[in-house]
Structures are given as structure tokens and as C-alpha cells.
Amino acid sequence: MLMCWFREARTAFSVDFLVGFEIEFIILKSTRPVEAVSNHGWTTANAFLSGNIAAVVVEEIADAIQESGIELQMFHAEAAPGQVRVPCFY
């Protein structure tokens, strides 16, 4: 339904849309007990130190998103321990 509306807007008014979505998740070191991979602040670089497991996981996710043809402008640490935000555009 939404895609039909986008097509109609493009045809009738020469308008195009950039649709975005965000993926947020928490990377855990263990589930028993529940423990996040890091305890970082919002957008801090220490959440993705070179070679740490969070950096490896997020880089693999970012690569897969880009390979699927979705534009990835950035990813960054969120406020909760181990939390990551990946905004994407299609």
C-alpha cells in the first residue's frame, strides 16, 4: 500500500522519498549472568575499540546491510551498556 502511494507521488508530483529505519540491539558477553560486552556512554568511541567483539559484530552487520543495497550512513553506541544503533536508508 505504501509503495503504491510513493509511486503515485513520483508520477503525479515528481516527488521521491528516502525511507529510513533504525536497528537497535544490545550485544551480550554472556546470558547467565546477563552481561553486556561493554559499559560505554552514548556515541563514545570506546564501545568499538579495534578488534573487540562489539566492533567485529557491528562491522559484519554493517557490511551485510551495505551489500544488500541499503545505504548505511553510520552506526554508533547507544546509552545502555552494549547497546548499538544502526540507522539505515532505502
Image (cartoon, rainbow, N blue to C red):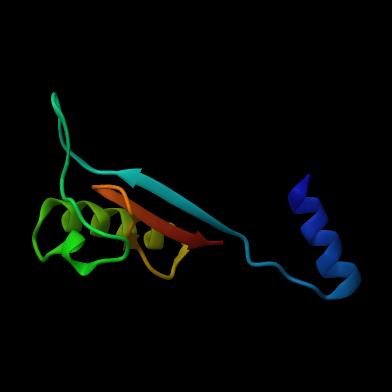
Picture quarter with the N terminus: top right
Please identify the quarter of the rendering in which residue 15 is found: bottom right
**Which residue is at the front of the view, 87 or 90?**
87
**Which residue is at the front of the view, 49 or 66?**
49
Residue 65 percent coordinates (x, y):
39, 57
Residue 58 percent coordinates (x, y):
26, 55
Residue 11 percent coordinates (x, y):
86, 68
Residue at horizontal 46%, vertical 60%? 87
| Residue reaching furthest to the left | 51
Q: Is residue 4 left or right of residue 79?
A: right
**Which residue is at the front of the view, 27 or 59?**
27
Please identify the quarter of the rendering in which residue 49 is found: bottom left
Q: Is residue 69 left or right of residue 42?
A: right
Residue at horizontal 83%, vertical 75%? 14
| Residue reaching furthest to the right | 12
Residue at horizontal 26%, vertical 59%? 41
Q: Examine the rendered structure and indicate whether residue 35 appears above or below residue 70.
A: above
Residue at horizontal 82%, vertical 55%? 5
Q: Examine the rendered structure and indicate whether residue 20 appears above or below residue 45.
A: above
Picture quarter with the C terminus: bottom right
